[in-house]
Image (cartoon, rainbow, N blue to C red):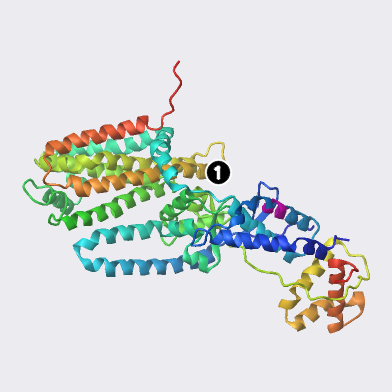
Amino acid sequence: MSAPKLDTLFRFETPEGITLDLPVAGPPARALAFAIDLRIRGAIYLALSLTLGLLGELGTGPMLIGIFLAEWFYPVAFEIQRGATPGKKALGLVVVNDDGTPVAWSASVVRNLLRVADFFPALYAAGLVAMLVSPRFQRLGDVVAGTLVVYAPPARRRAPLAPHAALPPPVPLDRDEQAALVDFAERVPELAPARAVELAGILTPLHGREGQAALDEVLGYAAFVMRGNETT
Amino acid sequence: MIEKQQQFERLHAVRWREFDALLGALETAGRGAPVPADAARLPAWYRELCGHYAVARDRGYSARLTAELHALALRAHRQLYRRDPAFGWRLLAFVTSEFPRMTRRHAHAMFVALALFLLPGAFAGIGCYVDSELVYSVMEANQVAEMEYMYEPGGKRLGRETGREASSDIAMFGYYISNNIGIGFRTFAAGVLAGIGTVLTLVYNGLTIGAVAGHLTRIGYGSTFWPFVCGHSAFELTAIVICGAAGLVVAAAVLFPGNLARKVAMKRAGRDAAVLVGGAAAMLLVAAFLEAFWSSSALLPAAVKFFAAAAFWVLVVLYFTRAGAVRHAPR
């Protein structure tokens, strides 16, 4: 295999001996998620003051408690329940412990209490600096709590490859080349037809065909790599 | 030639689909849906999948297939290593041993925080008791006037600006919660910024509380002030110090990580500080309840309040020195 490319992947090894990768989320995505959460929290404050606030003296106490809870524990409640606040969920983000497991409640409490420090002196300046310095985009609260904000793994299904007659490639292919062929064949349904033909044309010096014929030829190689000469 | 991917897929596709369905069921379980009957298969199937994933990567199978197996493994990992809350038992263990033990483990931070709070407090208290002008160096004149107004003997305003009604007890309860616990949280959070904010908050709180106590005692309002504050003081003052200590624990990890990487030191400190702050928040909750419903009561005679306060202090001291202590075998 070729050397791993530079990426924002957080890689960890599980007890089962496999390595898993999580793409960590950078400041822009997290700022957007925060903006959405801020709006939701504003709506909660508004609802509290419109219902309990209008009750007068009797409602003041519950209203203050409600605002206190929304201020400090709004993210905690969502992170423990489903791993992300609505804002993060909207951006496909999820909070995990730095061993990839769902965030523990004490860790969630710590990372959210420390928002005060990350906010310092204004608009999450300290948190932004900490994120830019950290290779895993951790703000101060994340460092102390041992948590990461990552992109939730996409629930994407592979479409089965369209059956194609297998063609033995004209030259022996090494593993990377074989993998590239199969990856290409899997991507063809997502590509514009003209682009697929254009990409297949890169191999024209090898097989001498052009246009749709070149694409069929390359898909044939991929089918051969996938299943050899046996029929489907 | 790489082993044939299609054959591999054909061999295992059924299991992957079953596994995907099981994970889907587990992910929705607890939110209305019941735990699936075949949940016990998760570990075995997960190990099998780990094998498939490792093989797929090693044989260089296509990016899509590896990605799909990777996504399955990731979801299963999240399910398998989920930390079971078992909330009731955790809470009991926390109150009876984890929290008091943690305060003893960080006794150094506790004593430093206590000194940072108590020394300025004693200084301001004695100073304001002796000198009638000193209080204005610590607080604004209108704040002092407000304090005097609240604790004026014979006044019906004991400890607050508004009149005394049941509904305002609840209002004050809400106010004490949002205000006092918020201050506790901020005191802790400031620790990660090298602890400067934590130290300042402790010193400032010590100075103002001391100044108010000294000043009100000097002008003869002690008979209303002390019965009011003594009841909740055991919980509130202790919790302020604990929040400060939690901030100092994190600050120490930031400034002096020792042999550990700074990041690792901070993470460990954070784990301990979470326990301290959680316990302190619970104490502040108790203090807010007492302050709103007990301390402010005009029906209870001062002697009862003093007696209860003494009992609370003994309780708190015993709790932090004894609770959760490991009993050694008799020698």
The residue stretch that appears in magenta: B45-50
Q: Is residue A159 left or right of residue B35?
A: right
Residue type highlighted by circle 1: Val
- The answer to which quarter of the image holds residue B104 is top left
- Of B285 and B130, which appears nearest the observer? B285
- From this viewpoint, is residue A166 visible? yes
Q: Is residue B94 left or right of residue B23?
A: left
Residue A129 at x, y percent in the picture: 51, 57
Residue B46 lies in the magenta-colored region: yes
Residue, x 52% and y 50% (percent of image)? A143
Residue, x 19% and y 42% (percent of image)? B229
Q: Is residue A61 left or right of residue A232?
A: left
Which chain letter goes with mark 1? Answer: B
Residue B331 at x, y percent in the picture: 45, 15
Residue, x 41% and y 68% (percent of image)? A40
- From this viewpoint, is residue A100 visible? no
Residue at the extreme right: A170
Find disc 1 in the rendering and name its residue: B264
Q: Quadrant of the C terminus of chain A?
A: bottom right
